[in-house]
Image: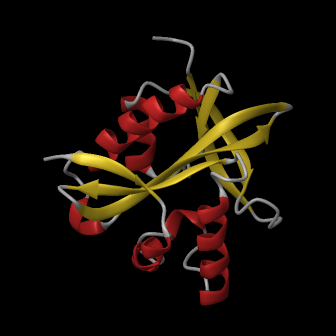
Amino acid sequence: MTVSLEPWTDDCLDLLRRINTPQMRAHVGGPEDEERLLARHRRYLAMPERGLGTMFAVLLDGERAGSICFHVRDWQGRTVYETGWNVLPPYQGRGVAAAAGAALVEAVRADGRHRHLHAFPSVDNDPSNALCRRLGFTLRGPCDFEYPAGSGRHLRSNDWRLDLSAP
C-alpha cells in the first residue's frame, strides 16, 4: 500500500463531490449545495498562491482516496496551522488517514512558518480524534469552533495541537 499526497488541481472537483455526502459530512454540518461546493473548490485552488496553505488529494496506490490540508488561521490570538481530512468509505480502516496525516505533518514542518498544527474534529468523531492521538497531537480540550470560518455556525469540537518544533 502506497499513500501519497498530490496538490489540489481543477481535476479534483470530482473528488470533492464524492466527499460531499451526508455520511462524509456528518460531523461538519452536512453536504453543501453546488454553489458552496464550487466556491470551496476555488478556495482550495487559490490557497498556495495566497500563501494560506495547501489542499492535497490523498492517493492510495495512485487512486484518489480522500483529501487532507493545512492552512493558516488565527486561533486564540496566534497564527497557527490547521489541518483537516477526509477518507472515502471504501478506503477507511486501512491506515490511509494515518499515512496521509504523517506525510502532511512533514509538509507542514517543511513550510516552517508557525510552531503549532491544530485539528478540530467534532467531539463525537471518534475516528478523527483517534487519528489525532495516533499522530502525536495533544488534546487541549473541547471548544466551540466556527465552521466554516465566517459562517457564524459553531460546532462542538476538540482542540488537538501538535508542536512542530518537537522531534
Relative to 91, 155 lies left or right: right
- Residue 81 locus on image (x, y percent): 65, 37
- Residue 69 locus on image (x, y percent): 52, 50
Q: Is residue 15 above or below residue 114?
A: below
- Residue 129 locus on image (x, y percent): 45, 42
Relative to 137, 72 lies left or right: right
Q: Going by the picture, which residue comes out furthest to the right?
A: 77
Q: Going by the picture, which residue comes out furthest to the bottom?
A: 34
> Looking at the image, which is closer to me, 37 or 130?
37
Is residue 106 among the parts visible in the rendering?
yes
Q: Going by the picture, which residue comes out furthest to the left?
A: 1
Is residue 86 among the parts visible in the rendering?
no
- Residue 147 locus on image (x, y percent): 70, 60
Q: How many tags in the picture?
A: 0
Name the residue rendered at 70%, 46% in the picture: 51
Name the residue rendered at 59%, 72% in the picture: 41
Q: Identify the coloring.
A: secondary structure
Q: Going by the picture, which residue comes out furthest to the front?
A: 49
Name the residue rendered at 17%, 55% in the picture: 61
Relative to 70, 89 lies left or right: left
Which of the 4 quarters of the picture holds residue 120?
top right
Q: Is residue 150 above or below residue 100?
A: below
Relative to 6, 74 lies left or right: right
Which of the 4 quarters of the picture holds residue 143?
top right
> Looking at the image, which is closer to me, 130 or 47?
47
In the rendered image, the quadrant that contains the C terminus is: top left
